[in-house]
Structures are given as structure tokens and as C-alpha cells.
Amino acid sequence: MGDYALEGPRWGAGAAGTGGGTVTWAVDGTIPTTFLGILQGAFATWAAAANIAFQQVASTATAQIDFTLGGIDGLGNTLGYANYSYSGQRMQSAAVTFDTGEGWHASGARVISNQNVDLAVVALHEIGHALGLDHYNAKPEVMNAVLNPAITTLGAGDIAGIQALYGAPSAPAVVVATPATPAAPVTASPVTSAVTAVYRFYDTHTGDHFYTTSTAEKLQIQQTLPWFTYEGTPWATPAKGADTVDVFRFFDTVSNAHFFTTSVAERDQVLKTAPSYKYEGVAFEAYADASASGGLTLERFYNTQTGQHHFAGSAEEANGINHGAAGPNWVDEGKGFTVHLPTDTMLFA
């Protein structure tokens, strides 16, 4: 195994290690024209490293990879994120969102954030996810979850990973590295080592959302449950400590849905009175104090028809559910538990 990690699916109908064909991409009206050269350069860098080609098209309606600029969580947290849909092991579509809260602006030939983060590196990273690469944290690379100001182009592990998916380029190409900018270096968030990304899936059979912090479980789902759509990393969880509480996980054999709670009393009540709920243990940690720094309190909803629970990660999502965006029969049960915002170093895989 090389210095890389794979998400699972890939573009193209062939097996891993074969060419990915030509993948189309487009930007919507929110993307400034100053971004275009950056994105074109990022795609050229990936194309030079593997047997896959890219073509920019006029409309996101026909493109396979879309780009947009949208509000995520403000300056200094999530810089951008990528999500995708797939069938079996084949990519169907992907979308990359850059956070408007970062204050992206032109600086010479570069586009940077208000904290001097280079959009070119963020674009390389998010496109890597859209192509099927996961985070690899054992050494500094573009696909490392921690931004490193010295890393400005693909490393050996990034190239090995993309070639594991699509093979070597059909013709040799040279990837030119941009010298690192030593001024105002980007540093990792001090809480990065203390939080763990949560992976979210949507079960298209039941309408349930499933959450896990286990990379192994995530890969197992992607390899064996094609009806589970991977939705990325919406939030993170703190490391276990004096300021955290356990989040307990149940599986309801009637609705085929999962239920999460931090309440010991509720856990014990479910164990006593709901035989269809199978206890699966502690899933991850949550903050005991909802006002914890970096905390994100999830709103809990219950569907009276399906018996499913859902945890909304933003006021906008909760408001939408309360106004019927997710369909009828959803009851707002109030605050669920407090997790951690995804950090800029997670880049919302």
C-alpha cells in the first residue's frame, strides 16, 4: 500500500488502475472569473499525473463536476468541501463548494483567503476528493487533512493514489511545483488533533442518515452498500475527555434506521422498552457543554410515520425541515447533542 487512501468509487467504467476517460466540469454564476485559471491549473495538474482527462463545459447542468461559492461557516473554519454520488464503484457526479466566508481575493497571480490560504491548494485537494482520493495523514501531501504551507503541488503519495485509480498518464508530463510562499504561513488549527471527522451517509432505501467516525466502516459501506450515498464530513467529534459525553448508537430492526443519544436515561429506557432497537455501543463523543469552543449543537427531529430520527447541523437545515423541505411528519424534538464544527484542516472531505 502506498502513501495514499482511496474513497472507493472512481470515474470511468473500467477497473481501478485503468483510464478514467474525459470528465467534464463547470462553474456556476457564483464563481468569480479570477477562480477560473486556478481551477484550470488544478485540473491540468491532476491530468498530468494520471490517465484521465478533463474538459470545461459551459453549464453545470451538463457537467460531471460542479463548482460553486456558498456560505459554510465563516472565516477560518471550513474552506470548502466536496461531495459526490456514485453507483457501485462508479462516480456519477460531484460538487465542490468554496466558503464565501473566507474572503477569497486576488493577490497577484494567486487567489487567497483573508488568512492567506492559497485557493490553488484547496482546489487541488477538493478535486482530489471528487476524483476518488481520501485523506492521507501519515506525511505531508495535498490530500493530507492538515494544510501545510510548504505543500503547493502534488506529492509522491498523491500521484501514487491517483495512478492507483486511473493508471499512469498516457504520455509523460511534467508537473511544475510553485515555490512555497514563506510570508504569513498557514498553520493548522490547534484543535485539529483533538477532533475526528464524522462521515455521513444517506440510505436511499429508507431515507435514513447514518454517521460514523470509522474509516474502515466507511469503506465497508462504500464497497458493500451501493444504496448508501456518501455525503461527506458535515461535522466532527471531540476526543474523549472530562468535558465530553458518550453518544450511544442503536439500530432499529423495524425501520432499519439508526438512533443516537447522549442521555443515559434515554439509553436505558430504550433498552427496557424498545426490543426492536439493538444497542451498538458508543459511536463517538459529544461536548457536555453546548457553549464549548467550536461546538455545533445538532437539532433532533423524529418522523412519526417512519420512526426515523434526523440530526440537523445548521439553523437553515432545521428551518427547512420545520417548513416541510424533508416531507411531512417531522417533529422537532429540540437540541440533540453538541459536536464540533469541521475545521479548515478537514476541508469537509
Image (tube, rainbow, N blue to C red):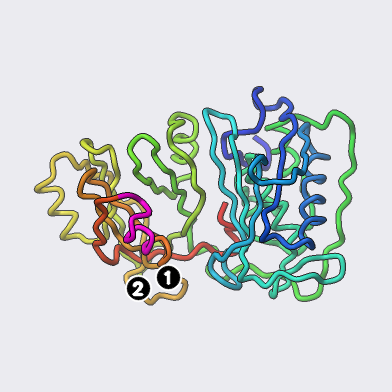
Region in magenta: 318-327
Q: Are marks 2 and 1 in contact (CB under 8 Å)?
A: yes
Between 300 and 273, the one lying in front of the other is 300
Q: Residue at x 40, y 37 (%)?
A: 204
Between 19 and 216, the one lying in front of the other is 19
Q: Quadrant of residue 242?
A: bottom left
The three-letter amino acid code for the residue at tag 1 is Gly
Residue 78 in magenta?
no
Between 153 and 95, the one lying in front of the other is 95
Residue 319 in magenta?
yes
Work out whether mark 2 precedes mark 1 in sequence or the reverse, and give the earlier one.
Answer: 2
Q: Is residue 12 above or below residue 160?
A: above
Q: Quadrant of residue 35?
A: bottom right
- Marks 2 and 1 sit apart, C-alpha to C-alpha, by 7 Å
Mark 1 neighbour density, 10 Å: few (under 14) some (14–19) many (20 or more): many
Viewed as shown, does residue 103 lie left or right of 211? right
Residue that label 2 marks: 290
The numbered mark at residue 295 is 1
